[in-house]
Amino acid sequence: MLAYMLQRRFQRNIEQKKAKVAAHRLIFALLQQTNTIILIQRDYVFPELKNSGRFLSIPALAPFNLEKNTLQSSDLLFLLDDKAGRGILHCFYMAQENYIETLTQWNARSTLHLEKAQPALAASGLVSGADVTEKQIEEALGAHVYGALINVTDNCILSLRRTFRLLTDTRNKSRAYIVDRFGGDDFMDFSIPDTYGLDDESREDNSRVKMTLSVHRE
């Protein structure tokens, strides 16, 4: 009987250590995903937010790996142990699915920009840095590419904001649950000193009557 009890205690200790490691991985994954969203916003979107020609001036980005910094359900089995944990698991996967969808949208936009918009602009003879009208840009790109690039760019910017909010909320809830469950305060915490407009809910004036053509070719 004593041997059985010691074996059970040993097994529980192992399970507890595995759960704690998984909890650290969860917090780290949320950090990495949030950081990716912030870097896109900081490096590419924020400098062009007030630019009515941002659908062109935000460049095509290198393709994002959709599996990097993501977790599978098998990585987070410890969250299934109680109702609160299952709630955290749901929040995490909602945030992660939005994260993956956001990167998917940016990959699609980059392909459109690189393979359709840039060749059309090059063929049109419009010079980067020149003042151009909406009509000139539409004629250069063609109505379909012009409209598609505007829509996908605006949707990409909105998706960054939505995903940032979900990741931030999930991070706060996850860390509070983990600290309460495991005790101690050795789980990574991180602050965000500047969101570069990710938390801005104001409506924007996207008038494109006159623009300055600024195209970054990769």
Image (spheres, helix red, strand yellow):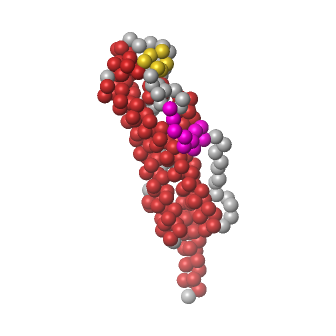
Residue at 64% over, 57% down: 187
All told, the count of numbered labels is 0
Q: Position of residue 91 (x, y in %)?
A: 49, 58
As drawn, the residue found furthest toward the bottom would be: 1
Quadrant containing the N terminus is bottom right
- Main SS, magenta region, reads loop
Residue 32 visible (yes or no): no
95 relative to 181 in the view: left or right: left
166 relative to 184 in the view: left or right: left
Q: Which residues are magenta?
A: 195-205
User: Is residue 16 placed above or below 126 in the rendered structure?
Assistant: below
Residue at 47% over, 28% down: 207
Quadrant containing the C terminus is top left
202 relative to 74 in the view: left or right: right
Q: Position of residue 147 (x, y in %)?
A: 35, 30
Residue at 53% over, 31% down: 49
User: Is residue 176 placed above or below 95 in the rendered structure?
Assistant: below
Q: Position of residue 68 (x, y in %)?
A: 47, 45
Q: Position of residue 175 (x, y in %)?
A: 60, 59
